[in-house]
Image: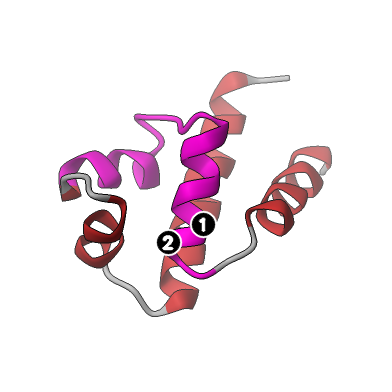
């Protein structure tokens, strides 16, 4: 599987989740106790979250990380 495509899809999923939750990058970064530029890297795909970070990011948005992982897997099958 193409690593670039995985990065892009994870970044899209994170950004969409944040927008759907009605949060700003600053708000999510604050909840996660990280700097906004660091969080922004996840949305741009220049940084890829590990499993724990993935879960923390979506929980910070009030979303179910398992459901988001399922969405990611489905997108990657397309």
The structure residue drawn at horizontal position 47% and vertical position 49%, both measured from the top left corner, is: 56
SS state under label 1: helix
* x and y percentages locating residue 25 in the rendered image: 26, 61
* x and y percentages locating residue 62 in the rendered image: 51, 70
**Circle 1 residue:** 58
**Circle 2 residue:** 60
- The answer to whether residue 16 of the structure is visible from this angle is no
Over which residues does the magenta segment extend?
37-62
- The answer to whether residue 57 of the structure is visible from this angle is yes
Q: Tell me whether circle 2 and circle 1 mark residues in contact (CB < 8 Å).
A: yes
Residue 77 in the image: above or below residue 47: below
Task: Confirm whether the magenta stretch covers residue 50.
Answer: yes
SS state under label 2: helix
Horizontal side of residue 72 vs 60, given as left or right? right
Q: Along the line of sight, which residue is nearer the eye, 63 or 46?
A: 63
Residue 19 quadrant = bottom left
């Amino acid at each position: 599987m193409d690593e670039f495509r995985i990065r892009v899809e994870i970044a899209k999923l994170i950004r969409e989740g944040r927008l759907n939750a009605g949060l700003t990058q600053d708000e999510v970064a604050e909840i996660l106790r990280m700097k906004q530029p660091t969080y922004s890297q996840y949305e741009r795909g220049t940084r890829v979250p590990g499993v724990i970070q993935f879960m923390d990011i979506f929980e910070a948005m009030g979303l179910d990380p398992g459901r988001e992982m399922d969405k990611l897997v489905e997108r990657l099958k397309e």
